[in-house]
Image (cartoon, rainbow, N blue to C red):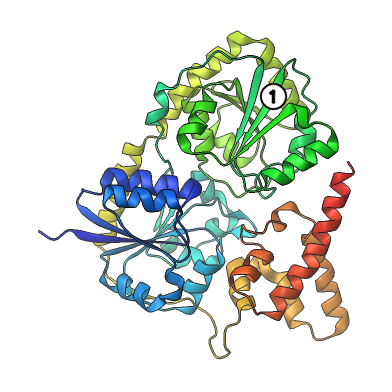
Amino acid sequence: MERLKVLHLTTHLGGGIGTVVLSYLSKVINGPFEHEVLCLNYADRYSIKTSKKIGLKLSDHMYQRISEVLDSVAKADIVLIHWWNHPLMADFLVRNTLPASRVILWSHIMGSTPPQNFTNKILKYPDIFVFTTPISLNIKEVKRLPEKYKKSLRVIWSTGGIERLKLIKPKRHAGFNIGYIGTIDFSKMHPNFLNISSKVKIPNSTFIVIGGPNEEELKQKATRLGVDGKFQFTGFLPKRKTWEYLSSLDVFGYLLAPHHYGTCDQSLQESMAAGVVPVVLANPMESYMVKNGITGIVVKNQTEYVRALHDLYRNHKLRKVLSKNARQYAQNFSLEKMIAEWDKVFKEALRLPKTQKRWKINRKNKLAPKDIFLESLGSYGKVFASYCNSKTDEEKERALKKIIKLGQLPRWQSETKSTVHNFNSFLPGDNYLAFWSKMMRKAQTNYQAQNNNV
């Protein structure tokens, strides 16, 4: 009997999202559904190797072969779009009409903060919209949806599985190790990570920072500040090597930016599963995932963060209790549970008729890359739209000043993460995007110069 086909459409496959998707597919590859993955951009070496190992059909660089993507969409029983606000996926969805299909969109971001935000149009686009965290249900764009669209919303906790970390046992080691594992980019990591961490005065303490892509830049800044002796930067590491580090961490100091884009964080799941007590700021995601005083410590500000690390250093008994609770709580992030919930959603989708999917936009004029960028931001793109629609030089200058001001915010400074720079890189040749990127980069340079002198 021929199996029903699920087509996974993603921008790229690798990193945290790759871990989640491949962990899931490794478990279900011989199940009731046949799975195939198409990447508009690249699949990393680990993803390619794993796909071959488990017998998964994987194709990448499909952005140059859109007609083949649309053919695959038409043939699939279900299309699962792995979504975050990436330029290539935005361009694909806005420009193309999908043939009759059943589309599920799985958001891998919280969706609350531009440029990694939800829009009214993206929320209405699929037949079923799946969040990775219940926090997304409280975002204003979601709450304002008409009731008929709210009925298509679902929540499935995202996980690459924590079962393998049950076996991790603490290793004896010298000193006191505080870990950070994940993205080193100030769109997610706290912009004052080094300054705050350097205020920790625990004897023989070391901050072990695992991840990238900007670890060298952070390392150089630590040297300029004269605090490099407190930090060890490893760069990206294979999963097994990362888990080895987890066994020698005393605390997980997960200091993230107040308006980061993260959702059901894999690093936080894994630290708790390994019994490494997390200390986090009271951002929405962390506050939801960490139970203060039970599975870790949630702090209100930087001063409390430093104090919490000192308290855990002095109070071994408290650390032991929180570690045990964290291990137990992390079992909620079960891969088997996620698989069961996806089976329910797939069965629900199969009861729906196939329909064409078309982005609602005025197509009288040729769509330029800046139009795709504006569509990706929705109501958050007003300042950029105002610049485009200015009737006078004074109006244009006022809009430009606001754009430059955005460029001073860390979440708009990344070369990736849906910024103007990101769109200008992937969708080149647009004078608006190029100019905005240039002006925001100047603001970014000034911001970094001020920071380096702190």
**Displayed quadrant of residue 64:** bottom left
* Residue 124 image position (x, y, % from top left): 46, 66
Q: Is residue 92 above or below residue 349?
A: below
Kind of residue sitting beneath label 1: Thr
Q: Is residue 188 above or below residue 69?
A: above
Q: Is residue 322 left or right of residue 404?
A: left
Q: Residues within 10 Å of mark 1 (few under 14, many from 20)?
A: some
The image quadrant where one finds the N terminus is bottom left
* Residue 340 image position (x, y, % from top left): 29, 43
* Residue 441 image position (x, y, % from top left): 78, 63
* Res. 155 visible in picture: no
* Residue 94 image position (x, y, % from top left): 50, 75
Q: Which residue is mark 1?
A: 206
Q: Is residue 34 left or right of residue 192?
A: left
The image quadrant where one finds the C terminus is top right
Q: Residue at x 69, y 74 (%)?
A: 433
Q: Residue at x 40, y 22 (%)?
A: 167
Q: Residue at x 73, y 40 (%)?
A: 219
In this figure, what is the number of numbered marks?
A: 1
* Res. 369 visible in picture: yes
Q: Residue at x 49, y 30 (%)?
A: 243
